[in-house]
Image (cartoon, rainbow, N blue to C red):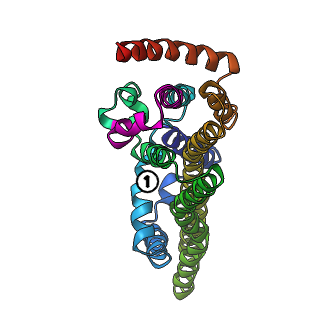
Amino acid sequence: MLVIIGYIVVLGSVFGGFMLVGGELGALYQPAELLIIAGAGIGAFFVGNNGKAIKSTLRALPQLFRASKYNKALYMDLMALLYRLLAKSRQQGMLSLENDIDNPNESDIFANYPRILADKHLVEYLTDYLRLMVSGNMNAFEIEALMDEEIETYEHESEVPANSLALVGDSLPAFGIVAAVMGIVHTLAAADRPAAELGALIAHAMVGTFLGILLAYGFISPLASVLRQKSAENAKMMQCIKVTLLSSINGYAPQIAVEFGRKTLYTSERPSFIELEEHVRQVKSPGQKQTEEEKV
């Protein structure tokens, strides 16, 4: 939604300012130059990327027009889920998590957090490392190194769509110049025409430079920035899981481990210590009740 609002502001400011000085929008309508710029940009996109990068970019485009799902409520859900899993493992042993790990969609714990469960990548990341913890064959340093490698790989893959769009955005001003030069060449070929017609042809040629710069910095390049921000938010969720699980492996109680994870979050979404403590307290009560029922 913010992307669409931003586009409206860009168009309103640019064309509104042009009209305020007496410009006519009809003069800016040059489909031939738009074809040159857009076609060359799309062609450069295909030339500069392999099949995997192209598919990754096309899959990422719909995310640009959706509101970010990463907010305080989602982070609270994540930390509550981590707390319940770690509390269960501390009370009943790590082997008690096997069913939750193998079938998260059928797990009573995961079922309480549908927003987390809907993120398949995040659930897979969490369950994979819980499975390693259950196996007991890896120490904290080995698991931390493996987590760092996976987060680095994810960040590298997430950069591919952003870099692809940034490359297209950087090329559009140059293609705008190409369109303008071709327009000037066409104008020089018609040098025998009256001055008024030559002026119109030159003006039409300059529209190419205008369109290239506008499309680059007003439309395409900002999308690369949005993709980087979205991937950084997802990576922050992975880092939160990493710190929390490593704290648990090192012997900290679930509530303290979750507090360690809280510190990794961005300040704009990070709940306060009191908010997290109260949330964990609310989660803790039904968890203890369920444990008593299982014992009976």
Quadrant location of the C terminus? top left
- Which residue sits furthest left? 106
**Across the whole image, how many numbered discs are drawn on residues?**
1
The stretch of residues the image draws in magenta is: 81-104
Residue 270 lies left or right of residue 41; in this view the side is right
- Give the answer, above or below, for where 59 lies relative to 69: below
Amino acid type shown at disc 1: Leu
Question: Residue 146 colored magenta?
Answer: no
- Give the answer, above or below, for where 11 lies relative to 77: below
The residue shown at (36%, 18%) is 294
The residue shown at (41%, 28%) is 113
Q: Residues within 10 Å of mark 1 (few under 14, many from 20)?
A: some
Is residue 19 in view from this perspective? Answer: no
Q: Position of residue 31 (x, y in %)?
A: 42, 66
Q: Quadrant of residue 103?
A: top left
Residue 35 lies left or right of residue 221; in this view the side is left
Q: Position of residue 72 (x, y in %)?
A: 57, 27
The residue shown at (66%, 53%) is 141
The residue shown at (49%, 31%) is 89
Q: Nearer the viewer, residue 249 or 34?
A: 249
Q: Which residue is mark 1?
A: 61
- Disc 1 is placed on an element classified as helix
Is residue 225 in view from this perspective? Answer: yes
Q: Position of residue 161 (x, y in %)?
A: 50, 61
Q: Position of residue 273 (x, y in %)?
A: 69, 20
Q: Nearer the viewer, residue 77 or 170?
A: 77
- Give the answer, above or below, for where 223 lies relative to 295: below
- Which residue sits furthest front? 296
Classified by dominant secondary structure, the portion drawn in magenta counts as: helix
Q: Nearer the viewer, residue 58 or 207?
A: 58
